[in-house]
């Protein structure tokens, strides 16, 4: 009997789910299997804090994951610094895997730590990384891991491009309970178990164990099509479950196979384990309103593989919801087969020392100056967006269109609504007369730098903050006192904003000109205008919504005081 150690990380449910299924299959083959959580190996309460920070980041500044993934893909140094930061788990991880015949990782961080131990000769048995995602970023590929197992050739090719040498493509680690319904009677019994309607098409909206993303909007837009009734998996997000206005809200579900057999299609936003489980159940799956970062990269990889189409436009949603099941083009090879073959296979490794402490300190400073600043701003540090959401008022902020002058009637209507105008570098260059007319009518002019809202860049875009501040002062005779941002800023951005004596607005919601207004809007509402939409009608709709809900339409100048 061989002993196998599987190391996962309880960041979401996908990594742990794959670990449990691999353990079950290996146990069936007669191996003794232990599963360990990598977060438990971090010093003190650092592991729990890391999991909480990950969730907070997804909720507060989800687009920061786009920035992190881009840095990982473009910079080997940044990836190596992150790996060195987590090298503090080296000693406890060595204790965990002592006496094992094979070590399997289902998360990139333990893979990197195990790779270092393998190179130094402190782990002498084979180490295998099981790639749980369809998209592969740089941290997934560790140089001294003996084997990478991919779910599809698309993921395998991405791993090869990042330097993985030995790769095997197998089927997903999905339990046998995920199978198609044997009959219509079984499907009806499944619906009855969860209190779902016996008739009609049901769309299962999966948002992971934390229920994060634009779930309420997804449910509303599915319901609006009339093509299906949304059944929303809220997971541990009790707030979402209580406040969901459209469809059927479910909390934590222990019997996912039966629930999937009760539904007709799965709508997901992260491309994780739920997608693979749905495909194994014989359900069609679509990606819609996907999460930033890994959600988008997984969506692209699943779409490229021909497994899950990525629906980017609400107009295509109704047609996508009518999709019928097709056989998923996935490998039939059991993932335990290459694991069995890897037992006893080992290669010599070299020992080499690194200065981990200095690198770890560098990573910590970089994190605090970038992601840490974004989290702080989203929480209220140097920003007024979060505070404005609690005030019971709505502040209208229109992103001025750079392609078409704003009419006098619309400017007048915006002034009556106590609204403000977000002005970017492009608007200053192409529509200076519109900016001057807005200021003359008493509309507050807000700095939007090179976007509306401004989003930090790694190397570019920062100078636009000062350029727009100076340009607005030149056109209107008054410097702006507010700057609009999506909350993703770093320490350099904060310094520039402070130098120009501006305060940061983080919008509570963003609506497209001409789109339907949501319920319960509070705080700063950013209206994205384009040349072909009726901005005046949108302002009227916002005013009507505020009136119906007895919400005061306030001047954004109040927030700059």
Image (cartoon, rainbow, N blue to C red):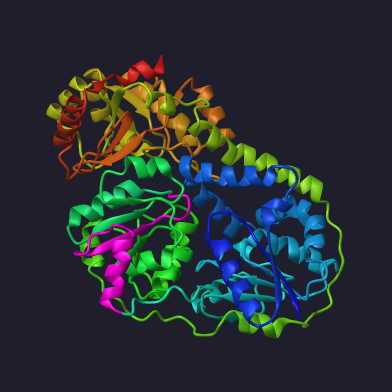
Q: Is residue 207 left or right of residue 247?
A: right
Highlighted range, magenta: 183-211
Residue 1 drawn above or below residue 233: below
On whether residue 67 falls in the magenta region, the answer is: no
User: Do we see residue 373 in this rendering?
Assistant: yes
72 vs 3, nearest the viewer: 3
Q: Is residue 400 above or below residue 29?
A: above
Q: Which image quarter is the N terminus in?
A: bottom right
State whether residue 311 appears in this view: no
Task: Please state the horizontal and vertical placement of residue 559, each as a whole percent of the image.
Answer: 38, 19
Residue at 41% across / 68% down in the picture? 257
**Which quadrant of the figure contains the C terminus?**
top left
Q: Nearer the viewer, residue 34 or 480?
A: 34
Against 475, residue 528 (above or below) is: below
Foreground residue among 391 and 191: 191
Q: Picture coordinates of residue 458 (x, y %)? A: 55, 46
Q: Whole-percent x and y of residue 89?
A: 76, 54
The picture quadrant where one finds residue 229 is: bottom left
Residue 340 location, quadrant: bottom right
Residue 388 % position (x, y)? 38, 24
Residue at image location 67% in from the left, 52% down from the top: 39
Residue at (56%, 68%) from the top-left corner? 18
């Amino acid at each position: 009997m061989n002993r196998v150690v599987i190391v996962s990380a309880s960041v979401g449910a996908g990594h742990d789910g794959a670990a449990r299924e691999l353990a079950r299959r290996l146990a069936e083959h007669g191996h003794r299997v232990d599963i360990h959580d990598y977060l438990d190996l971090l010093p003190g309460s650092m592991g729990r804090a890391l999991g909480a920070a990950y969730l907070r980041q997804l909720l507060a500044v989800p687009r920061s994951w786009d920035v992190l993934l881009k840095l990982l893909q473009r910079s080997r140094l940044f990836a190596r610094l992150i790996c060195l930061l987590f090298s503090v788990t080296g000693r406890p991880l060595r204790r965990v895997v002592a006496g094992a015949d094979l070590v399997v990782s289902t998360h990139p961080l333990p893979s990197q730590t195990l790779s270092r131990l393998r190179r130094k000769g402190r782990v002498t048995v084979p180490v295998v990384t099981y790639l749980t995602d369809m998209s592969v970023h740089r941290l997934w590929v560790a140089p001294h891991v003996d084997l990478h197992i991919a779910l599809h050739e698309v993921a395998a090719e991405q791993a090869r491009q990042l330097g993985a040498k030995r790769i095997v493509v197998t089927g997903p680690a999905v339990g046998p309970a995920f199978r198609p319904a044997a009959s219509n009677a079984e499907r009806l019994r499944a619906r009855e178990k969860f209190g779902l309607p016996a008739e009609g098409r049901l769309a299962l909206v999966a948002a992971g164990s934390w229920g994060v993303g634009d779930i309420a909007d997804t449910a509303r837009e599915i319901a609006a099509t009339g093509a299906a009734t949304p059944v929303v998996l809220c997971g541990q997000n009790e707030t979402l479950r209580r406040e969901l206005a459209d469809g059927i809200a479910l909390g934590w579900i222990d019997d996912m196979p039966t629930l999937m057999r009760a539904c007709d299609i799965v709508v997901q936003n992260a491309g994780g384990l739920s997608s693979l489980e749905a495909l194994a159940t014989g359900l069609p799956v679509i990606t819609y309103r996907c999460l930033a970062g890994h959600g988008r990269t997984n969506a692209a990889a699943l779409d490229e593989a021909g497994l899950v189409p990525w629906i980017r436009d609400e107009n295509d949603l109704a047609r996508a919801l009518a999709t019928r099941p097709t056989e998923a083009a996935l490998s039939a090879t059991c993932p335990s087969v290459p694991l069995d073959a890897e037992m006893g296979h080992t290669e010599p490794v070299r020992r080499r020392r690194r200065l981990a402490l200095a690198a770890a300190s560098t990573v910590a400073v970089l994190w605090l100056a970038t992601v840490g600043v974004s989290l702080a701003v989203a929480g209220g540090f140097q920003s007024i967006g979060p505070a404005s959401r609690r005030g019971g008022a709505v502040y209208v902020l229109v992103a001025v269109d750079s392609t078409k002058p704003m009419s006098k009637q619309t400017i007048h209507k915006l002034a009556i609504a106590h609204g403000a105008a977000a002005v970017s570098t492009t608007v200053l260059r192409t529509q200076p007369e519109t900016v001057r007319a807005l200021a003359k009518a008493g509309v507050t002019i807000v700095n939007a730098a090179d976007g509306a809202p401004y989003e930090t860049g790694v190397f570019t875009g920062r100078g636009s903050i000062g350029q727009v501040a100076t340009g607005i002062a030149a056109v209107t005779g008054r410097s702006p006192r507010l700057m609009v941002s999506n909350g993703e800023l770093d320490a350099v951005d904060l310094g520039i904003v402070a130098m120009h004596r501006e305060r940061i607005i983080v919008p509570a919601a963003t609506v497209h000109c001409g789109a339907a207004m949501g319920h319960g809007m509070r705080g700063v509402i950013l209206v994205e205008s384009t040349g072909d939409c009726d901005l005046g009608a949108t302002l009227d709709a916002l005013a009507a919504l505020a009136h119906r809900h007895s919400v005061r339409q306030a001047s954004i100048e109040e927030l700059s005081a």
